Image: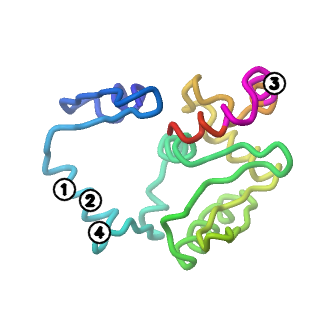
Amino acid sequence: MNWKKENAFRKFKCKTSYKDKDSFRLWTEVSPIFLNLRGIFYSKNKKIITTKLLNRLKPLGLAVWFMDDGTLNLRSGGDISTDCFTKEENVLIQKYFLNKGIDCKIFKRNSGTYKIVFNKEGFNKLVDIIRPHIHKSMFYKIDEKRRKKYLSQFGRKSLKRADSLK
């Protein structure tokens, strides 16, 4: 979050606080820019994604998205949680990545929500694009050796906790 505050929101007055050891909050001052952005990313108070929005993504935007919602999977490659998007929106996301030569599939969870799953080759292509923009504290999400070291040092429970602290 500090990275977001210092990079994405550096032009705005921000406040941050730690509610407890598991929660971090970031507030920005009210700005017409954010109201305009809300109109682009939300419809009827629900987050949306369109081909137009996806096509505007730059490597930095992909990296921020992955740092928030992405995970390295030691067995398959990796994934990005897309729980808030519909099946149709997940199809748009899949097509976006496929058009970039990044192989992926849509996975439906038991809860009925979705995620985009990358095989190892597709994940490696994604990482090649986003690596220059990944904050060092998030390298465990893209580097197998760091992830394995993290797991051996802290265990799976702490990794799930670290992933939930996004």
Q: CA distance from mark 4 to mark 2?
A: 9 Å
Query: With 33 as the anchor, is 2 left or right in this view?
Result: right
Count neighbours of disc 1 (C-alpha within 10 A) and say few if under 14, some if 14 to 19, many if 20 or more. Answer: few
Q: Nearer the viewer, mark 3 or mark 1?
A: 3
The kind of secondary structure element at disc 1 is helix
Report the residue marked by disc 1: 35
- Residue at 19% x, 56% y is 35
How far across and down, in percent of the image, does residue 70 sit?
61, 47
Q: Toward which corner of the image does residue 2 lie, by quadrant? A: top left
The kind of secondary structure element at disc 4 is loop
Quadrant into which the N terminus falls: top left
Report the residue marked by disc 3: 152
Q: Quick check: is 150 in the magenta stretch?
A: yes
Q: Which mark is residue 38?
A: 2
* Rendered position, 151 above or below 35: above
- Looking at this rendering, what residue extends furthest in the bottom direction? 88
Q: CA distance from mark 3 to mark 2?
A: 41 Å
Q: Nearer the viewer, mark 4 or mark 1?
A: 4
Front-lying residue, 122 or 22: 22
| Prevailing secondary structure of the magenta residues | helix
Q: Do labels 3 and 2 touch, CB within 8 Å?
A: no
Q: Do labels 4 and 1 touch, CB within 8 Å?
A: no
Q: Do labels 4 and 3 touch, CB within 8 Å?
A: no
How far across and down, in percent of the image, does residue 99 sit?
65, 65
